[in-house]
Image (cartoon, rainbow, N blue to C red):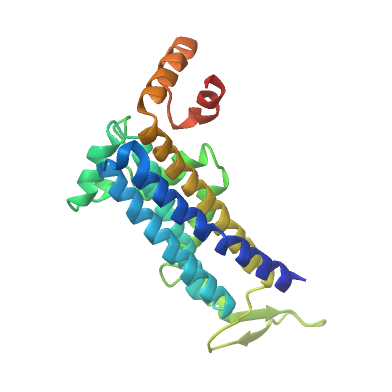
Amino acid sequence: MERKKINEHLLELQSRTEGHLNLGKDMLKADNSAMYPLDFLAAAALYRSLNLISGFCKLIEEDNFIAAAPLLRLQIDTYLRFFAAFIVNDPHIFAENIFKGEHVNKQKDKDGKRMTDRYLAEKLSELEPWVINVYKQTSGYIHLSDKHIFSVLNLSKPSSGDRLIGMLKIGKGRSFIPEKAYLEMIEAFIAATDLFLKYISGWIYTKANPEKVKKLEEKFKEKYGRLPTYKDFPDIEELE
């Protein structure tokens, strides 16, 4: 049953490919095809996300959890880095700095905080609580750690005695990782991808409707006494 669900979830994830391409087309057409610095960052993020999905799905199909897990961490990184553009004073300067080779973790947000991966994950967790936990868990697969040890080690306690019996596996493919863990990882990949595409859509809407966005910001300020932040997307939509 779990295997069937895994295959169904992989198909769902692969279906996001068309969404990436359609958003890319919409972005390039918006504002009479004008190009802004954030467009280049968005295009790079879309390209990266598409290829991570492709590689991730192939590795899951091969039962290669160990190689697939870091790709989830990379997909979250794509989401974090593009999200950062929404919490800085000027997203285009932010994008230009990346283009020049300046690391995101050297740049600061509107509050003057350095945007380290951990900081961005914590900021996003204010909206999506699951992000920080998945960020921590998948980071363990980037460097050799206890997660790699337990993936090849299966411990069991016999019916009598205090000694544990262990099985050790060295080889390609499936290890002692349960299918439930595969399913949860795919679900997290889908969630990270969908949220990333939501922010891409947000940029496209802003690019295509600058005057409309400006009026919505003014309405928001009249109602709440401040300009909207990344946390206020639902409230802004209600004003439309």
Q: Nearer the viewer, residue 235 or 202?
A: 202
Q: Quadrant of residue 114?
A: top left
Residue 46 location (% of width, % of height): 40, 55
Q: Residue furthest left?
A: 100
Residue drawn 57% across the image and 56% down it: 190
Q: Nearer the viewer, residue 80 or 210?
A: 210
Residue 102 seen in the figure: no
Residue drawn 41% across the image and 20% down it: 217
Q: Nearer the viewer, residue 22 or 221?
A: 22
Q: Residue furthest right?
A: 159
Residue 198 seen in the figure: yes
Residue 220 location (% of width, % of height): 46, 17
Residue drawn 54% across the image and 70% down it: 57
Relative horizontal placement of residue 169, taking residue 38 as reference (left or right) = right
Relative horizontal placement of residue 156, taking residue 94 as reference (left or right) = right
Q: Quadrant of the N terminus?
A: bottom right
Vertical position of residue 212 compared to residue 102: above or below: above
Vertical position of residue 167 compared to residue 81: above or below: below
Q: Nearer the viewer, residue 14 or 30?
A: 30
